[in-house]
Amino acid sequence: MDYNNRLIQRSEKWRQFHRDKTPGQILVTICPYTFNVDYGAFGFPARPLSSWDFDKDTRAFVAYAKKQHDFFLEYTKDLDNDYFPALNVNLGYGVNSAYVTGLPVTFGEDTSWVHHLIDNWDEDIPKLQMDDSNYWYRKVLEMTQMYVDLQNGEYAVAGFPNAGPGDLANAIRGNEIFMDLYDEPENVTALMDFCGKAAIWLEDSIHKITGDVNGGSVAANCWFEGRAPYISLDFNDLCAPQQFRDFDFLATQKILDYYQSAFIHHHMKGYHIHADVAKLKHLKLLEISWDPGLQKPVELLPEIIEMHGDLPLMVRCTAQDVYKYIGDMKKGRVVIMLNIDNLDEGKEVMRFIRKNSII
């Protein structure tokens, strides 16, 4: 696909960031998740996921999502921002396992749910399949193609927000899996191995439709050289470090070995495993996200940057956090997911960041 000069230039800036390991480089993504624009005030009211019939409304949903994204790009066009505009199929966490379980998906306002599949290991494991006829597998590819068809050089079409092997295994087995780590280790290992292969299967299928983005790919609205899948490791935030090392670390490493790259997301709830996550080979960018009621990752930057070595960090924070912790940010390579309240605040803090970053 062809991309406009602005996106080509932006991908080259990201390329420089990934190749140059010099500390003091700070990039920023102000995205729809961190800048809550009231689209309804402009005659474009939000619609909950539960209001869509994905049997009949697929094309209308894709057009709606693109229109909303186009509005965000227009509204924020004067922000100095490293956000790489991209659309992908993101229908909540239910779909992230239904593409291999085939179970019905229940939609809420902005996410989705499914029941778990495995109650009896021997009876239910054979029900898991990487099946081209699976409804949600086909729907994900159908919607991806629609986003590509609407692509006009203004945005990329990204891969799937993949549940990592542990997240996917948790969805398939349910929360019994936390006991299974001790009681059924061989079954858990086999399940996570399947889940890692399933993530690769889906990601490869999507890439056949999207192709490359100036020799790379987009995950979490960041550009990467080559193919870098988005992988969530939230499951492990509820595990002891040894359980992470014994199970999902090994399954996730197989995905990174396959692609020689990845973006990984997890939460401050899992700060106790963060140093181990940072040891995954071929990892290109690691996000530790904030959680209500816990210390913000940005408040622990020196410790986190020490865990990372030359691996770049993604951290979410406010403009006030930037002013307070900019000295710590300059000690590593940092991608800020920046929460702002309005355009003026965004413009002011971006001027401050650019003065303090070497890129």
Image (tube, rainbow, N blue to C red):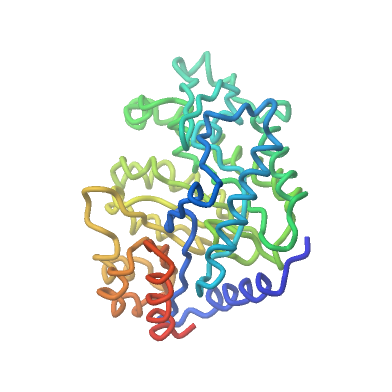
- Report the residue at 47% width, 37% height from top: 110
Horizontal relation, residue 20 to residue 233: left or right: right
- Report the residue at 43% width, 58% height from top: 35
Horizontal relation, residue 250 to residue 318: left or right: right
Q: Give whichever of 139, 312 is nearer the camera.
A: 139
**Is 164 placed above or below 99 here?**
below
**Is 80 placed above or below 134 here?**
below
Look at the image and tell me whether residue 315 can be seen.
Answer: no
Give x and y (percent) for residue 289: 36, 54
Look at the image and tell me whether residue 58 can be seen.
Answer: yes
**Is 344 placed above or below 24 here?**
above
Horizontal relation, residue 344 to residue 31: left or right: left
Give x and y (percent) for residue 120: 46, 15
Q: Give whichever of 308, 327 is nearer the camera.
A: 327
Q: Give whichever of 214, 189 is nearer the camera.
A: 214
Give x and y (percent) for residue 342: 40, 64
Give x and y (percent) for residue 1: 78, 60
Q: Give whichever of 111, 37 is nearer the camera.
A: 37
Horizontal relation, residue 319 to residue 44: left or right: left
